[in-house]
Image: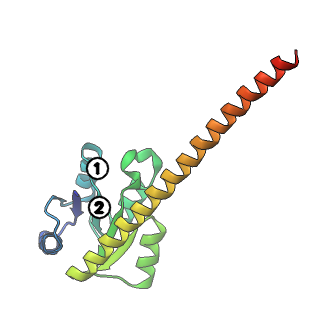
Amino acid sequence: MKLLIVDDNQYARSLAIANLKQIGFHNIDEADSGAEALLRLHTGSYDVLIIDWYMPEISGAGMLSVIRDRRFGPAHNIPIIVMSAYTNRENIERALGLGANQVVAKPIKTAAMSKAIGDVLKTERQSYHSMSGLLNKVQEEDILDDQLLVDNDEADTAFL
C-alpha cells in the first residue's frame, strides 16, 4: 500500500506519518501543498490520499473538486481521507459532499486513522467486487446473446 499525505504544516505531516507507521504503513509519500500533491497523483500511483482541509493556494475542498472530476484521469477514484482541526458538521458535510471518503479530526489519533483507512479500503474492495460481479454478468449475457444469434441463424437456414 502506498499513501500520499498532504499538509502544509510539517509537524502535522510528521505526526500523521508517525501514526500511519504505528498502524503498519511504511510506503508513505508526503507533499506540502495541494499543487505538489496533484502533480504527484499524475506521476505516481497511490492507494490512499490523506489531505488537510485548510491549506494555502489549493485547499482540501479545491483538491477534492479537481481530483473527483473524471477529466483528472485514473486517480479520480482514489480513496481520500480529509483531516482537519475544524471537524464541525458543516465542514464534514462539505468534505463528504465534494467526494471525501472519510474525515478525521486533528490532532490525528492512531485509532481514528486506522479506522478511517480500514473503512475506505473495505469500501474499495466491496466496490471492486460489485463492479467485478457486474462485469461478469454483462459478459455472461453477451455470451447468451451470441448463442441466441447463432441458434436463430441455424433455425433460419434449417427452414430454407
Q: Residue furthest bottom?
A: 88
Q: Are marks 2 and 1 in contact (CB under 8 Å)?
A: yes
Q: Which residue is mark 1?
A: 41
Above/below status of 10 relative to 89? above
17 is higher (above) or lower (below) than 88:
above
Look at 26% across and 65% down and name the residue there: 56
Residue 36 rendering spot, x and y as whole percentages: 23, 53
Give the distance between the C-alpha atoms of the residues marked 2 and 1, in whole angstroms: 9 Å
Q: Residue sitting at 63 percent across and 37 percent down?
A: 142
Which SS class for mark 1? Answer: helix
The answer to whether residue 3 of the structure is visible from this angle is yes
Q: Is residue 100 visible?
A: no
Residue 59 x/y as whole percent: 32, 64
Q: Amino acid at mark 2?
A: Leu
The mark that comes first in sequence, 2 or 1, is 1
Secondary structure category for the residue under label 2:
strand
Which residue corresponds to mark 2?
49
Label 2: few (<14), some (14–19) or many (≥20) C-alpha neighbours in 10 Å: many
Query: Which quadrant of the structure image shows residue 158?
Result: top right
